Image: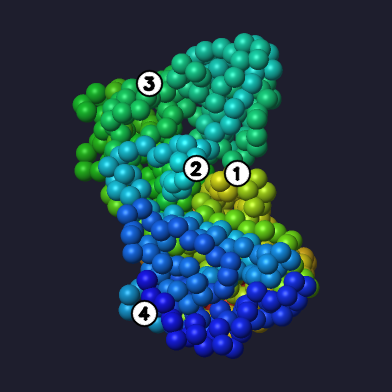
């Protein structure tokens, strides 16, 4: 702890009482902001500054030398568990302010550049950086129950697998797959409940788990779901029994956790068996599917949170399959498809293993829970309570985990949240991306994203938006590290193409040209890897071996909101001119409805662009 005693004395001399007379709301707010600016000018990396009363803080367990009680106090973020600010202008004439300088994922080589968090009014923040959770995930331990940990006061940092209770409307068959042609594995009686753990892409079939552990599928129309089935992961089809917890289990579909080995059998009745797991952006995983000489020719497929294929493997030096060292591009629920070689008829026993090679981790206050008042400005000259977050200009994309929502920003945003309501992410400068439950939404300046919250508050469903925001009031942007102007609300007519990224290569003759795209995380999209972890997908590989298809066009695009922020490279490669010489070509890259690359030429070429 450091206390800026000299500054404190000077401010007390300049402002004899920050608790001014009741009714002087504009003066109180202006004085508090001026005091916070003066008190907190010396805050350094990974430090919190007590800007103005009222503010209380609780240290992390085991921290003894902790003093964060008066304006000017500075504490290391590693020592702070929670901070609670108050807005009691009407009662006591005080308004809480705190300033945090957070390193987040910025490199150590940029010590002067930090993410700024400015809390004001009625706001509470709780650290959720996960050093202990990373260790437990690496050890294969199951994540803590969110409700139990919330009662104990410890934030859950692992994203729970979403499930929904369903009740049979009448007698119902539970089938081995998402089809009326699949075999019946169990039955439901009218009023009987089960747990839905997945769905097919059309959401007209649900994968359920019965009380005895049996896994199967029911048609959505014959059950009543206690919630929106859209939050469930796409698991498509499954076998007929569930695995249990432990290092080894016998199963034909269901959930799998890190460190678990599942044994099962591929047969003609259940040729494709799906297993879901929760992971964080940046996790590196290895998945193996081994037949062990049973006669099975294994085949692995990994689906991302949106149900898109992000990796496949047939043989890894033998008939066995392995997806090794796969870096996952976003947080959410992934699906492992364990099956046999496509077009084959092999059957036999298998062992499926999921390993977490390295886990995504967060620095102090890079991951946190928070709640604020909404619509509680004490006067027209004061903002509603909230948190301003500013990423330093030119430092790249900053990653935060806020109320279990992944937020990427190269901008300034205004955060508000209430339990059992919404978290609102208003982008006042630059752009931001929010991801939860496998859905990503991109928002430019002048818009906001909403994410539904449970009582924690934590994300209870995917984000929606972007939508134009209304009047944000007099936000204290002058207290941020870098000066900005609050963007005007973006007209709804300009939101149609937000989050859409696509690039198209066309050429003029029967030659074999290829489109290559290099994403900010280093992944390459090309004919050798047509789908990446972000969801970027190559439409087709045209004119292979000079066999004309009549189409001289290749396209790469992402699901709306799926493309990463950062620096891209897109290249044109004349793989084979097929005897026609270098054909002329045209390349167009559209980002958010705007052409950022529009080039014509012949021969090989490469173009950078930044999203």
Residue 84 visible? The answer is yes
Where residue 479 sits in the image (x, y, percent)? 58, 80
How far is disc 4 from disc 2 in space, using C-alphas? 34 Å
Q: Point out residue 587 in the picture as x, y percentages from the top left corner.
A: 55, 73
Could you tell me how far apart the alpha carbons at marks 4 and 1 are, in whole angstroms? Answer: 37 Å
Residue at image mark 2: 150
Picture residue at 32% right of the left edge, 79% below the top:
109
The residue at the point 32 percent across, 38 percent down is 141
- The mark lying in front, picked from 4 and 2, is 2
Earlier in the chain: of badge 1 and badge 2, it is 2
Name which quarter of the figure residue 76 lies in: bottom left
Q: CA distance from mark 1 to mark 3?
A: 44 Å
Instruction: Report whether 208 appears left or right of 246.
Output: right
Residue assigned mark 3: 267
Q: Which residue carries the number 4 mark?
A: 111
Q: Residue at x 50, y 23 (%)?
A: 209
Q: Which residue is mark 1?
A: 455
Give yes or no for contact between labels 4 and 1 (Cβ–Cβ under 8 Å).
no
| Residue 34 against residue 521 in the figure, above or below | below
Lower position in the chain sequence, tag 4 or tag 1: 4
The kind of secondary structure element at disc 3 is loop
* Image coords of residue 349 (percent x, y): 29, 23
Indicate the quadrant containing the N terminus: top left, top right, bottom left or bottom right: bottom left
Residue 110: x, y in percent? 37, 79
Up the image or down, 150 lies above or below 586; here it is above
- Tell me how far mark 3 sits from mark 4, CA to CA: 58 Å
């Amino acid at each position: 702890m450091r206390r800026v005693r000299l500054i404190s004395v000077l401010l007390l001399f300049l402002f004899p009482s920050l608790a001014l007379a009741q009714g002087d709301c504009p003066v109180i707010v202006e004085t508090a902001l001026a005091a916070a600016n003066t008190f907190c000018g010396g805050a350094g990396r990974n430090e919190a500054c007590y800007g103005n009363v009222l503010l209380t803080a609780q240290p992390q367990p085991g921290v003894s030398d902790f003093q964060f009680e008066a304006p000017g106090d500075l504490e290391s973020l590693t020592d702070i568990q929670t901070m609670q600010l108050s807005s009691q202008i009407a009662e006591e004439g005080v308004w809480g302010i705190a300033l945090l300088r957070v390193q987040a994922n910025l490199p150590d080589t940029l010590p002067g550049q930090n993410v700024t968090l400015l809390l004001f009014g009625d706001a509470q923040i709780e650290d959720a950086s996960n050093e202990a959770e990373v260790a437990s995930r690496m050890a294969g331990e199951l994540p803590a129950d969110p409700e139990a940990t919330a009662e104990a006061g410890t934030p859950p940092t692992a994203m729970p697998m979403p499930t929904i209770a369903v009740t049979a409307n009448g007698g119902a068959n539970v089938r081995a797959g998402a089809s009326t042609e699949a075999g019946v594995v169990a039955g439901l009686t009218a009023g009987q409940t089960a747990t839905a753990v997945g769905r097919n892409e059309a959401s007209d079939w649900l994968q359920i788990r019965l009380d005895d552990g049996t896994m199967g599928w029911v048609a959505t129309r014959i059950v009543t779901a206690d919630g929106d089935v859209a939050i469930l992961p796409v698991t498509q089809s499954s076998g007929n029994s569930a695995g249990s917890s432990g290092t080894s289990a016998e199963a034909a579909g269901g959930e799998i956790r890190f460190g678990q080995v599942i044994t099962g059998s591929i047969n003609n009745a259940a040729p494709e068996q799906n297993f879901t797991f929760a992971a964080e952006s940046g996790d590196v995983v290895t998945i193996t599917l081994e037949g062990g000489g049973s006669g099975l020719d294994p085949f692995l497929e990994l689906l991302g949170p949106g149900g898109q294929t992000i990796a496949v493997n047939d043989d890894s030096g033998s008939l066995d399959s392995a997806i090794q060292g796969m870096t996952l591009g976003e947080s959410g629920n992934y699906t492992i498809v364990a099956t046999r070689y496509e077009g084959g008829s092999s059957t036999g026993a298998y062992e499926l293993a999921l390993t977490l090679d390295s886990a995504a981790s967060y620095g102090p206050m890079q991951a946190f829970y928070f709640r604020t008042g909404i619509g509680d400005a004490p006067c027209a000259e004061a903002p509603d309570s909230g948190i301003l977050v500013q990423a330093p200009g030119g430092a790249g994309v900053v990653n935060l985990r806020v109320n279990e929502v992944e937020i990427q920003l190269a901008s300034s945003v205004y955060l508000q949240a209430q339990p059992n309501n919404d978290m609102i992410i208003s982008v006042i400068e630059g752009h931001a991306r929010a991801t939860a439950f496998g859905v990503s939404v991109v928002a430019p300046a002048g818009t906001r994203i909403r994410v539904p919250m449970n009582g924690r508050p934590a994300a209870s469903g995917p984000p929606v938006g972007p939508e134009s925001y209304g009047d944000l009031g007099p936000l204290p942007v002058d207290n941020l590290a870098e000066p900005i102007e609050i963007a005007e609300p973006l007209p709804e007519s300009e939101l149609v193409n937000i989050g859409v990224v696509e690039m198209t290569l066309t050429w003029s003759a029967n030659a074999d040209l290829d489109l290559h795209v290099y994403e900010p995380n280093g992944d390459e999209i090309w004919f050798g890897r047509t789908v990446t972890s972000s969801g970027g997908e190559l439409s087709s590989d045209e004119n292979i071996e000079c066999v004309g298809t009549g189409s001289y066009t290749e396209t790469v695009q992402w699901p709306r909101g799926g493309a990463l922020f950062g620096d891209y490279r897109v290249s044109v490669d004349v793989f084979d001119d097929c005897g026609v010489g270098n054909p002329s070509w045209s390349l167009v890259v559209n980002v958010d409805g705007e052409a950022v690359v529009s080039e014509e030429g012949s021969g090989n070429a490469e173009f950078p662009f930044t999203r």
